Image (tube, coloured by chain):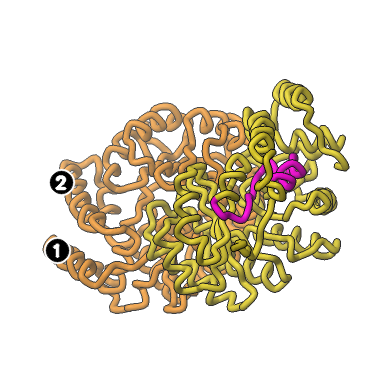
Chain colours: A yellow, B orange
Amino acid sequence: MAIRHKLSGIYSPVLTPFTPDLAPDAAAFVRHCRWLVAQEVGLAVFGTNSEANSLSAAERRGLLDALLAAGLPAQRMLPGTGCCSLTETVELTRHATSAGVGGVLMLPPFYYKGVSDEGLFRHFSEVIQRVGDSRLRIYLYHIPPVAQVPISLGLIERLMKAYPTAIAGMKDSSGDWSNTEAVLKQFQPDGFDVFAGSEVFLLRTLRGGGAGCITATGNVNPAPMVKLHRSWEGSEADPQQAALDVTRAAFQKYPLIAAMKAAVAHYSRTPSWRTVRPPLTELATQQERALIDSLETIGFAMPGL
Amino acid sequence: MAIRHKLSGIYSPVLTPFTPDLAPDAAAFVRHCRWLVAQEVGLAVFGTNSEANSLSAAERRGLLDALLAAGLPAQRMLPGTGCCSLTETVELTRHATSAGVGGVLMLPPFYYKGVSDEGLFRHFSEVIQRVGDSRLRIYLYHIPPVAQVPISLGLIERLMKAYPTAIAGMKDSSGDWSNTEAVLKQFQPDGFDVFAGSEVFLLRTLRGGGAGCITATGNVNPAPMVKLHRSWEGSEADPQQAALDVTRAAFQKYPLIAAMKAAVAHYSRTPSWRTVRPPLTELATQQERALIDSLETIGFAMPGL
């Protein structure tokens, strides 16, 4: 029996371009999103790799509005809307949901550490009830290495029972395959869409019945990921996965956001793409040169960028 | 030679009261701040114990405006203005500074972990330059157990050199006395105001030339702390410190914010004070009863509340 997913495929936490004075560059953002959509990658705007938490709520709303105004398809968008505060989370989730997005990717409130599942359940409950929109589809964002606040299996179970329509799936960025496997086994049969947080787990996730992956390097290497998502049952799947891993490793030798921005700047000949907001820093010139050299060596390209 | 501090004494990260529907209760907030000022405690509104990161930027601005409209003294305020985003940090810092506050308490951007001192330096630099107000006095907020992004001695040194007027001091909530001691030795001689993050370090901080403490339990036990701050050179200082530690320990057996809110609710006979915003949860009834019992045993009171 074929698995039916609400959302599936490859999504990318879209890099956020800044002008040299650190303002979001909406025009460059729209251009990059158009390229990603042309590569058949979904727009998980405002993720970790988007420097979303380095943006104000108003800046996130403004960038989403710019994409909509440019005619990019809302249904292909999966914006990050989880903030530390209930109120900003509700504001962003309501704004995105009313725009008709495919879903929202929601971090837990991440300032307080060691909080209880009861407290997190109350937070997500409040958000769902306050947004009060039957179109709401939440993808829970589990990224303990950064947020330091995990989304446990027990919490997922409780949320799915209470909100079977609104709780749609998750992105697992734990980097721990045994967790992704456990989520797939326990919740996928009930229609919970599991996305791996990196393409290094793409093939395993698809073989386990998962929906796909939401991955940083979808910004730079989308086509081979989309191809694997389409042909994962074929005989070439393992070598395809191995090739993805090689490209990932080339980027991951450096701070990932700065490295991807350097690659986009280089291949699009747009120097301002290198800009990151503090507290991040751009790659040093020698690092960028070494990155581009290693990408050339493996035949990397960003056609059509 | 007497040490001259820009700010000194006891400050409290003011608890934020919520109405039962989780909205900030400005009237109860003003009342609590009036009581704290009458106890001669400064108003470090929007700290960790204020659930500040569970508030939107607009909610923080609104509560600060409510205090100002109520005639509370801006000079006694030390609002928390550090957010994950540069833009919200600038917005809140500018708003507070233009209101004439004594200083601002500034978290580092705390979403990304393992960021470099260079990235943090750029963040604080941008904030200072964008606020562009000669009245700005920043107290750096070092709280690695929660923010998970520390403020190193090297960063303090670099910031003080670049911004000798704006960088005014710090709150050390590391819980690590050796760090406070190192900061006192290295930077106090240049007029850097060091506040301990808990009254358990108050006497040691004052003996080391520090400015005082900014402490959660200043919300509930202010008078004895103020008394020790005034008489720390007297013969009764050590027993006074020991008494402070006893009260602190009684609260600290429970999740601290919920425990303090339960005490304020109990002693002010205002049940809604128990309300916390998710992801925090209030004390269970039995916990609250045990807390109040233990407070009664040690003769705790909140006179005039």
Residue type of the residue flagged with mark 1? Gly
Give the image location of residue A188, x and y in percent. 52, 60
Element on which disc 2 rests: helix
Residue B176 rendering spot, x and y as whole percentages: 33, 36
Residue found at the very far left of the displayed protein: B297
**Where does the N terminus of chain B fall, quadrant-wise?**
top left
For residue B266, the mark is: none
User: In the picture shown, does residue B35 fall above or below A26?
Assistant: below
Instruction: Decide whether residue B51 is among the magenta residues.
Output: no
For residue B207, above or below residue B236: above
- In the image, residue A213 lies in the stretch drawn in magenta: yes
Residue stretch in magenta: A208-228
Could you tell me if residue A83 is visible in this image? Answer: no
**Any part of residue B258 in sight:** yes
Q: Which quadrant of the structure image shows residue B143?
A: top left
Q: Nearer the viewer, mark 2 or mark 1?
A: 1
Check if mark 2 and mark 1 are on a common chain: yes
Report the side of A77 relative to A27 (left or right): left
**Which residue in the protein does label 2 denote?**
B239
Q: Earlier in the sequence, mark 2 or mark 1?
A: 2
Q: Element under label 1?
A: loop
Q: Which residue is mark 1?
A: B299
Q: Chain of mark 1?
A: B
Q: Residue at x 79, y 38 (%)?
A: A264
Residue sitting nearer the eye, A12 or A40: A40
Q: Is residue B254 left or right of residue A276?
A: left
Q: How many marks?
A: 2
Is residue B107 placed above or below A256 in the rendered structure?
below
Q: Position of residue B79 (x, y in %)?
A: 50, 56
Identify which amino acid the numbered label 2 is placed on: Pro
Position of residue A49 measured from the top left corner of the image (x, y, whole percent): 65, 45
Q: Can you say whether A129 is above or below A239 in the image? A: below
